[in-house]
Amino acid sequence: MYEYLEGVIELVTPSYIVVDVNGVGYKVFSPTPFAYKEGEKAKVYIEQNFSDNNGFTLYGFQSMEAKGLFLKLLSVSGIGPKSALAIMAAEDSDSLAEAIEQGEVKYLTRFPGVGKKTASQIVLDLKGKLGDYVQKLDRQVDKSVSPALNDALLALIALGYTKKEVDKITPKLAEYNAKTADEYIKKGLALLLKK
């Protein structure tokens, strides 16, 4: 089994990439193929799948957390690799987890190959189980804000506020010009509690 492939991205298409590893080209299906650039070296985290129709297929992700989210989606009865990729390609992890946590079945049915029954199954199987993946996926450093503000934003999300709620107050917090994360957190909580 492959854990990851590290090589040069030879080809990027709307549904897959080709990774050249020491002269061997691996066709890897990805939810975000255009995140890779042809000619650049990359590490692609791999999940290998076998089906009677297609034989062995490789699915690739930019991080272990994204791969974990894919595997969680695959664990749901009625979700195959194509549906899982489509869900991940169409939605950011935070919105997806929020929809699942709030049991928004109708919202989930907008994804290709996901009917009402499958959407209900996704909620039933994954509610309360995506927090770890989503927090790690969303814990990317925002370079457009100061380190203190970025730490404060991550802290507010860790306190249970959604990324959408925190994103709404970020411009106001950026104007605040505090020196420490603690000051930003206090100001952020004040803004969030006003609503």
Image (tube, grey):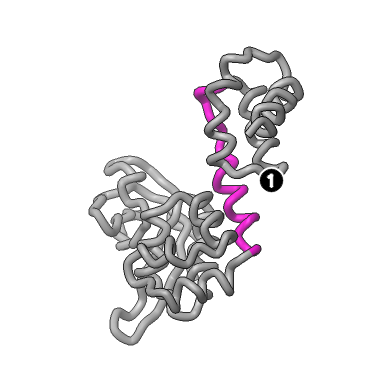
Q: 75 left or right of 6?
A: right
Q: Quadrant of the C terminus?
A: top right
Q: Nearer the viewer, residue 173 or 139?
A: 173
Q: Mark 1 highlights which residue? A: 160
Q: Position of residue 126 (x, y in %)?
A: 58, 68
Residue plotted at (24% across, 54% down):
14
Q: Nearer the viewer, residue 80 or 16?
A: 80
Sort mark 1 into few (<14), some (14-19) or many (20+) by Cα contacts within 10 Å.
few
Three-letter code, disc 1: Gly
- Name the secondary structure under disc 1: loop
Total numbered badges shown on the rendered structure: 1
Q: Position of residue 158 (x, y in %)?
A: 69, 43
Residue plotted at (50% across, 23% down):
144
Q: Is residue 5 above or below residue 186?
A: below
Q: Nearer the viewer, residue 78 or 80?
A: 78
Occupied quadrant, residue 185? top right
Is residue 143 in the magenta section?
yes
Q: Position of residue 150 (x, y in %)?
A: 62, 28
Q: 57 left or right of 73?
A: left
Residue plotted at (53% across, 75% down):
75
Is residue 2 in the magenta section?
no
Occupied quadrant, residue 87? bottom left
Q: 77 left or right of 57?
A: right
Q: Is residue 95 above or below residue 74?
A: above
The region drawn magenta spans 128-145
